[in-house]
Image (tube, grey):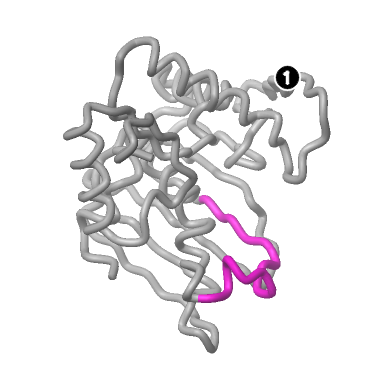
Amino acid sequence: MLNNGKHVLCEKPLTLNSKQCSELIELAEKKNLFLMEAVWSRCFPIYDVIKKEIESGNIGDVMQVIVSFGFKLDQVDRVSLKRYGGGTIFDLGVYVLEFASFIFNGEEPTVIKAAGHLNDDGVDVSVSATLTYKNKRTAIVLTHSIVKLENEAQIIGTRGTIKVPDFWCPIKIELPTGKVEIPLPKAAHLFNFYNSAGLRYEAIEARACLKAGMLLQDILYAVRFPFTQGELT
């Protein structure tokens, strides 16, 4: 698409390794074209609520983020087979990592420790990772394709906690002062996946970027730090 002069909104993961990622970004810059990884979560209005709540100081200093994402997907080829770029890191890990990155303003962790399990095809079916940041801050991220996890994010501060159910496509949030809900826009048709009417937010964001003349959306860079910590081949 880029080679044919087309702007691109690319489904996650943007690529399967750091070399491909760098090449794609360089091509977009060379062609003077828009490139955005489709991390639709960032476009949900609830993310603005989270940001404002943290900036207000209502929960104090954020010290801990805990986020899990898991469904029974071990029989789904695109998740379970290596030749399709399978694995929970590529399918679900994008979301838990982008959430941690969002809360800590894109800061790179100083230490990443991870453990997990592989299936017979050499694809990860579960990952538990601890991301250590400066000033005694930590994020714990979990992915799984054999069991369903809580699929919730918690942002724990020195004065309170924010809970975000369905954090990858949230329409409500639990604050220390109460709950906030922003219903999805009404859709003319049914969707296959949960809260997919929220894809409208992503489309609106991409359109706004194009109208503003932006070429590489900031959302893309927010989830690139894992590639800077080590090569994925």
Question: Which stretch appears magenta?
Answer: 67-81
Q: Quadrant of the C terminus?
A: bottom left
Disc 1 packing (10 Å; few <14; some 14–19; many ≥20): few
Q: Amino acid at mark 1?
A: Pro
In the rendered image, which residue does mark 1 sit on?
Answer: 185
Q: Is residue 143 magenta?
A: no
The count of marks equals 1
Q: Nearer the viewer, residue 33 or 171?
A: 33
The residue lying at 48 percent from left, 69 percent from top is 127
Q: Position of residue 69 (x, y in %)?
A: 59, 55
Q: Position of residue 13 (x, y in %)?
A: 43, 52
Horizontal arrangement in the rendering, residue 154 relative to residue 108 (left or right): right
Q: Position of residue 141 (x, y in %)?
A: 47, 57
Horizontal arrangement in the rendering, residue 62 relative to residue 193 (left or right): left
Residue 190, relative to residue 70: is it above or below? above
The residue lying at 41 percent from left, 39 percent from top is 37
The single residue placed furthest to the top in the displayed view is: 212
The residue lying at 65 percent from left, 42 percent from top is 166
Q: Nearer the viewer, residue 189 or 41?
A: 189
Q: Nearer the viewer, residue 93 or 204?
A: 204
